[in-house]
Image (spheres, rainbow, N blue to C red):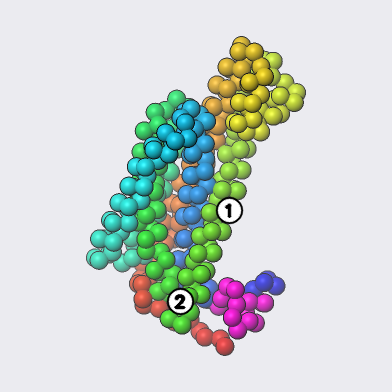
Amino acid sequence: MAFVRRQRSLDDPMIDVRLFRNPAFSAAVGTNAAVTFATAGMGAIAVQYVQLVLGIRPFTAALWMLPTVGGTIAGIAVANLVVRRVPPGIVVGAGAAVAALGFVLVATTVEVDSQVGVVIAGYTVLVAGVGMAASLVIDLIVGSAPPERSGSAAATSETAGELGAATGIAVLGSVAAAVYGDELRGGLPDGVTGPAADAATGSLGAAAAVAEELPAAAAEPLMAAARLAFTQGFTTTAAAGAVVVGVTALLAVVLLRRVRPGAAAAVEHVG
């Protein structure tokens, strides 16, 4: 509250909190933050899954991620075509819904021994939806603010996206780590106890380090259990992302369906 009061008292505030009096602006900023929250958190875990669970080398994993770039481009292209006939708020909501479908595909199809193409297919659907939403939501943020505050609106949008991404990595990463630890504690093989067990349940990388110090008879079951636990954390996180983005899609359609880029809604100007 002290930050808000301080910003309201400044002639040139860091964040113009008065813009949030406009429900359309608040909804557009919230949509941007929520989508980046889910996708950034999911992306960080997906990369670890491909490399550490499926055992794909970093360079090869990067090549496998190239189709997701195409998915993003396709999403942007579709949004730019559809928005000529459909209100942008509806398109943003539809994009978020497609992203939610991508999360659901990852949550329901990915297993510990999945082919990498299964993961990439679900993730490509996800980023296609994000491309649809992201290509228009910034225009909606700027368009819902008065022209003289467009710069402040754009800065707020960028801040919301960065905050959403950082929070998503922290929160969803913590969810994945918690699920991983709980699952692995219940599946540790005999002979992995004490400090070794504590280290192994901390992360998949730590489990690999512990396995290197164990005989093969214990190392192989440990890594099998650790990969399974990490996969369960990954799919649980995808399910959480589906809920977040699905709710965001619904709210975007309801709150942004009548907002158009460049058509600034009235916001009381407080000097």
Q: Which residue is found at the position 52% from the left and 30% from the top?
A: 52
Q: Quadrant of the C terminus?
A: bottom right
Q: Say if the magenta span includes residue 96.
A: no
Q: Quadrant of residue 262?
A: bottom left
Q: Quadrant of the N terminus?
A: bottom right
Q: Which residue is mark 1?
A: 167
Q: Position of residue 51 (x, y in %)?
A: 49, 32
**Which three-letter amino acid code belongs to the residue tagged 1?**
Thr
Q: Residues within 10 Å of mark 1 (few under 14, many from 20)?
A: some
Q: Quadrant of residue 162?
A: bottom right
Which segment did they paint magenta?
5-18
Give me the disc on residue 150.
2
Q: Is residue 9 above or below residue 224?
A: below
Give me the disc on residue 94.
none
Q: Position of residue 78 (x, y in %)?
A: 28, 56
Q: Is residue 234 above or below residue 88?
A: above
Q: Quadrant of residue 186?
A: top right
Foreground disc of the pair 1, 2: 2
Question: What distance separates the C-alpha of mark 1 from that of mark 2?
Answer: 25 Å
Q: Position of residue 47 (x, y in %)?
A: 49, 39
Q: Is residue 268 above or below residue 79?
A: below
Q: Which residue is found at the position 46% from the left and 82% from the top?
A: 148
Q: Residue furthest bottom?
A: 271
Residue 209 visible from this viewpoint: yes
Camera-side residue of 232 and 68 = 68
